[in-house]
Amino acid sequence: MTDQIKQMAPKILEAIKKSNKILLHCHPYPDPDSVGSVLAIAAVLKKLGRDVTPIIGDTEYPQSLLGLPNHDWIQPKNYTQIEPNNFDLFLILDSSSPSQITQLTEIEFSNNMNTIVIDHHATNSKFGKLNLVEPTYSSTSQILYELFKLWKVEISPDIAVCLFIGIFADTGGFKYPNSTPEALQMASELAKINPNYHKLIFDLENNKKPIEVEMIGLALSSIEKYFSDHVVLSVIPYEEIKKRNLSKSDAMEGLVASLLKAVVGWNLVASLVEAEPNVVTVSLRTRDENKFDVSKIAKTVGEKGGGHKGAAGTTIIKPLDEAKATLLRAVEQTFPELGKQ
Ligand SMILES: [Mn+2]
């Protein structure tokens, strides 16, 4: 447990006890850590006798998380559909910037609303009145678990499974470097409180739509190899998307890039999907993020690119052939050693 958590725990609890109406939200395209941490703290706030309003935010509630207890507490509203003046505290979880609250409008907090940010993203801009940001923690769920212990609240089986699934998902199923002994220890304690998490994991990992599997098939039969097979691209032109009536959200580019990365020797891989004419979404992955930081490419090529060293993405507004040439040139310039191995 960090000193910061020990210092902040009583301050956050005091702010909660001073408030009557508390707002919670899920970030756009909410993941299990976003939903799990919201449901867990909602249960705690209810125990403390607070009036709590969790909203789903910009995106619909994910089908794959319908197994989480009390998910019906989360109202199908975004931030523009509530009245901020009705709340005296906004607990902002798992969100590194106000754009993770909503992308539909510029956020303005009302003056009588206290704001507390609790998050684990290193990029967090600390935009709350109080901020508890712990970048060494795997997940917001992991931070909440320690807060709950310090607040001496009883962790019910419902709270336990919500926190467990948040830690599980944000550690990539205990596979990422952020899966520390401490994270495993917490998961173990939570699993003792509620051992019924296997179905939730199954639902998380097996939630494809038929159209998505079709898309993966198309992507895997559209592979091109470059630089002595060290660089491998899956390239899907708009005609193929149109022919199958696929939409942008069916593109599966992240999953396809992750599948390509599984091949020994394919060191830098990318999925290119021309989801609309002359708009190419690119997802990049590498087997060795210390050698080939793919975020460097995502940041220099296309629009609004970014991500992590091992997994990044961007959008190139060009015809597919030009987009591909631009990407390959950037790979060659950023990692000249790739072609020489
Ligand atoms: Mn998270």
Image (tube, rainbow, N blue to C red):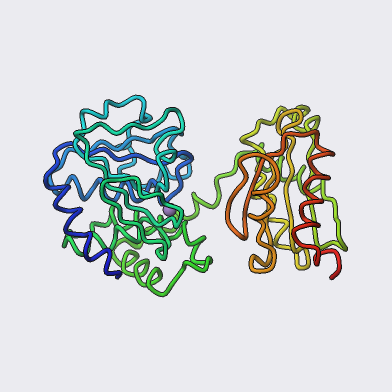
The quarter of the displayed image where residue 185 is located:
bottom left
Residue 296 at what x, y percent from top left? 66, 55
Left or right position of 43 against 244:
left
- Comparing 56 with 116, the one in front is 116
Name which residue lies at 72% across and 33% down. Answer: 279
The quarter of the displayed image where residue 291 is located:
bottom right
**Mark count:** 0
Which quarter shows the C terminus? bottom right
- Comparing 256 with 191, the one in front is 256
Name which residue lies at 37% across and 72% down. Answer: 182
Which quarter shows the N terminus? bottom left
Classify 86 as above or below 220.
above
Left or right position of 272 against 149:
right
Classify 227 as above or below 224.
below
Name which residue lies at 64% across and 47% down. Answer: 313
Residue 203 at what x, y percent from top left? 49, 49
The quarter of the displayed image where residue 101 is located:
top left
Residue 236 at what x, y percent from top left? 78, 39
- Comparing 198 with 63, the one in front is 63
Classify 160 as above or below 80.
below
Residue 290 at what x, y percent from top left? 64, 68
Left or right position of 204 against 319:
left
